[in-house]
Image (spheres, helix red, strand yellow):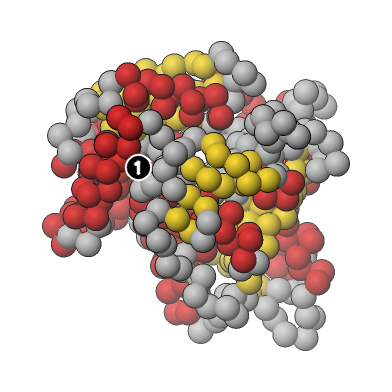
Amino acid sequence: MTETKGYFGQFGGSFVPEPIQALLDELEVTFEKYKDDPEFLNEYRHYLADYSGRETPLYFAESLTQHLGGAKIYLKREDLNHLGSHKLNNVLGQILLAKRMGKTRVIAETGAGQHGVATAAAAAKFGMKCDVYMGAEDVERQRLNVFRMELLGAKVVSVEDGLKTLKEATTAAIQSWVAEIENVFYVIGSAVGPHPYPSMVKDFQSVIGSEARRQIESLGKHADHVVACVGGGSNAIGIFSGFLNDKTTKLYGIEAGGHGITTDMHAATLTLGKEGIIHGMKTYVLQNKYGQISPVHSISAGLDYPGVGPEHAHLFETGRVSYEAITDNEAMEALIFTTRKEGIIPAIESAHALAYLEKLCPTLSKDRRETIIVNVSGRGDKDMHTVFSILKGENVNE
């Protein structure tokens, strides 16, 4: 897809104060300088392989395939990355850029904690100070990841504003960045924010799509369908990037339907949002009739964001990707089913994508064995408190 100076169609851009724009311009110059530089790429690929453990497998899910009627289901196992999610792909790239810009301290926002853990680990690896901003609600439901970040030497800042989730954490991180903009590098975790962040995150996450395409073709197969969950959209744009130019592959982005899209307890931004500005970008935003950003809900701390990456907004508008919503209950059923049938515990975020298989597979031809790839963006260790509470019959959705 052709990007015109930070825009994907009409979405993207950079809607920020002048001091931030000056730093973004510097970041863009640095990124453009190094993204194709052999020395930078060799270092980046070295850490992807020897530190993160790439490449990740493309695993044939035999039990899911049998249960769902015969379409061959493959799981892209981003949960097997070091630290348990796809987030490290992007963090390693940004940290290496920060080094080249002479930064000694990094900050990050996090929802489920996976991006925070990845940033804390990379900061420890490269000897940088690290602050991670996290909504107080997410701090409570992701205690394990909070401890992991602190163990890695990061300072976790609990944000008490608003709904105390990802949107507020992002706002607080931006405010902190502005206060010390000359000395601090902001490691954004998703394909969101002002230019060049959406393009940069996509570039570093595109390793998922390039691997998945090569792996499925090495099996002599064609990916008919690719499914990924979408909050801000980094894992989805990462895997989609390998297939966007192949119109014979259908792409599906799965949003957080929460209690249902007929309620006000969801985070289905593309399903129900409108064009707007959030966190320095033009995209789709969940907002009320006065243009105020609406509260959002998801059982998944990584998907409860009222915006979405600008390239996803463009892909939605052009119809290249179908975006659907999965409820909390559907996601949890898929998590438990995948765990018990495949012996793989997916993150609740990834379980939204797995849940969509129950809707997609019955629509497919029984005669032609179609091939589906689902991106398992992270593992569910971090979600055990939530899963345990549900199995005990407690209400975790309030």
Compared to 144, does 211 lie above or below? below
Q: Mark 1, residues whose alpha carbon is within 10 Å: few (<14), some, or many (≥20)? A: many
Residue 257 or residue 27, whichever sits in front: 27
Whether residue 3 appears in this view of the structure is yes
Left or right: 234, with 343 as reference point: left
Residue found 74% across the figure and 46% down from its top: 272
Picture layout, residue 195 above or below residue 138: below
**In terms of image quadrants, where is residue 34?**
bottom left
> Is 66 or 285 nearer to us in this picture?
285
Answer above or below: position of 227 versus 288: below
Give the tally of numbered discs: 1
Quarter holding the N terminus is bottom left
Q: Position of residue 23 (x, y in %)?
A: 27, 36
Q: Residue at x 48, y 29 (%)?
A: 170
- Quadrant of residue 320 within the rendered picture: bottom right
**Which part of the image, by quadrant, shows the C terminus?**
top right
Would you say residue 382 is visible in this rendering? no
Left or right relative to 12: residue 197: left
* Residue 131 image point, x, y percent: 35, 22
Residue type, mark 1 in image: Val
Residue 193 locus on image (x, y percent):
45, 41
Circle 1 residue: 91
Q: Nearer the viewer, residue 315 or 119?
A: 315
Q: Position of residue 257 (x, y in %)?
A: 75, 43
What residue appears at the point 33 percent right and 32 percent down from the top-left corner?
A: 18
Q: Secondary structure at mark 1?
A: helix
Residue pictured at 30% horizontal, 40% vertical: 24
